[in-house]
Image (cartoon, helix red, strand yellow):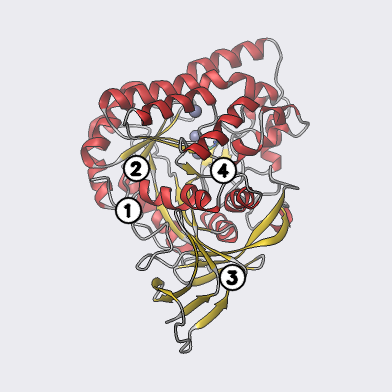
Amino acid sequence: MDLLIKNGTIITSTETYQADIAVKDGIIAAIGKDFPEDGATVVDAQGKLVLPGAIDAHTHLAMPFGGTISADSYMSGTRAAACGGVTTVFDYPVQRKGMSILELVNEKKAVCEKEACIDYALHCCITDLNGGAILEEMEKAVEEGISSFKCFFVYKKEGMMVDDGTFAKLLLRAKEIGAMINIHAENPDLIDLNIEQFQKEGKTSAWYHYLSRPEFVEAEADKRAIHWAKSLDAPLYIVHMADKEGLEAAIDAKRDGYEVFVETCPQYLEFTSEVYKREDGRNFVCSPPMKGQESQDALWKAIKTGGIDTIATDHCPFQSYEKDWGKDDFTKIPNGCAGIENMYPYMLAAANEGKITFNKVVELCSANPAKIFGCTQKGSITVGKDADIVIYDSEKDFTVSVDTMHSDYDHTIWEGKKLHGYPVMTFSRGKLVYKDGEFVGKPGWGQFVKRVGRK
Ligand code: URP
Ligand code: ZN
Ligand code: ZN
Ligand code: ZN
């Protein structure tokens, strides 16, 4: 064996038990007791929890957006991920108009081969069907391990928006080839209408970002997406769910037996729309925006009752000077916030406080994203799976600060957040990549996760 993790308490999505883990060639080779040490590296996890690494199924690394590029590269973003107990990130490369999706995927893979510090998977954002050629190409992409595609109902001026007809074609094609469509659901026309009105009235602070995209703007689009998915009997994954009404429609669809999956993000669980009234409200600007207390309560309730399938970050940070572009005009604020290093510690601290169970956190942050997106080697501490393992000290107190994060941005919405319990080690395929506050991995270690399709 190469590595033995001894005396820890193993947490899976369904079980909590004491056992040792033996790792060979990056794979969990055995789980049990009294393994011979035989020159293996031995880690004593006495008094600690031993969890599968998190899978952040929603990030935007080095993404051209909002007139700039998101602040974390594939290097710094995956480095920060490792330090927050994430062992697989999914990025969302965006197809430029007219571009082939395989060309886009190969472009990103070439960068990640050099930069990725942990394993990475790719969803692909489709903005243009290229006269139907993309519908053909999707099948090849699935064979290459890209089994999910995203579309945006918004971001018209960025050239990313798709109309309902395109969305429907993509849903049908995805169903046919064993793939899935992920949707950013907000109504672009309602947003434009609201923005036009606010601009006329000279209402330009970050608060009006929220008021231009309030609950019903998201709910309308969630319900429309769900309606299409149900009508076509195609699987659907709704990203960054933040509103109660849309969430309830998704839960109803699940109850009726449809494959509608729901993701939410830690920022919607922690902050409400009140943050947009703050002097630094622009730093919290993301789309969809944080919503009111009622929506936040509904999200927590759905976490407990099974209405939410995954937690992911939507990590898309921008520097302060870029956020400042919108100091006097909320429409100029690049949309997106940081979170890649905060998700697992935040959710685990919620478990440590007794709000949810540790098993639930593993389910939402690791087991479910692995299952839903076809990462067969990931998401569980089980013999034969990759040794993507996090050791968690439930007694360690940690206060989030941009100074102790491992990203390249200069501020964070999580500044000052106090967490009871924190990861102390992260292993990526058996290799130690994070220890006691320090990144100890290396760029280029991360491998492409070739995913299986849904049939
Ligand atoms: O504000 C956000 N969420 N920015 C990233 C792009 C997206 O919509 O996911
Ligand atoms: Zn989005
Ligand atoms: Zn929603
Ligand atoms: Zn996103």
Label 2 packing within 10 angstroms: few (<14), some (14-19), many (20+)? many
The residue nearer to you, when weighing 83 against 324, is 83
| Disc marking residue 316 | 4
Residue found 59% across the figure and 14% down from its top: 194
Residue found at the very far right of the displayed protein: 279
Left or right of 148, for residue 46: right
**Looking at the image, is mark 1 or mark 4 earlier in the sequence?**
4
The residue nearer to you, when weighing 313 against 361, is 361
Q: Of helix, strand and loop, which one carries label 1?
A: loop
Image quarter (top left, top right, bottom left or bottom right) of the C terminus: top left
Q: As shown in the figure, which amino acid type bears the numbered disc 4?
A: Cys
Question: Residue under circle 1?
Answer: 451
Q: As shown in the figure, which amino acid type bears the numbered disc 2?
A: Ser
Q: Of helix, strand and loop, which one carries label 4?
A: loop
Q: As shown in the figure, which amino acid type bears the numbered disc 3?
A: Val
From this view, report whether residue 300 is shown above or below residue 73: above
Task: Tell me the distance, in whole angstroms, between the alpha carbons under discs 2 and 1.
Answer: 9 Å
Q: As shown in the figure, which amino acid type bears the numbered disc 1?
A: Arg
Question: Residue under circle 3?
Answer: 440
Label 3 packing within 10 angstroms: few (<14), some (14-19), many (20+)? some
| Disc marking residue 52 | none
Left or right of 325, for residue 182: left
**Looking at the image, is mark 4 or mark 2 earlier in the sequence?**
2
User: Does mark 1 have its CB less than 8 Å from ligand 4?
Assistant: no
**Mark 2 vs 1: CB contact within 8 A:** yes
Camera sees residue 410: yes
From this view, report whether residue 96 is shown above or below residue 411: above
Q: Percent x, y for residue 94?
A: 42, 40
User: Does mark 4 have its CB less than 8 Å from ligand 1?
Assistant: yes
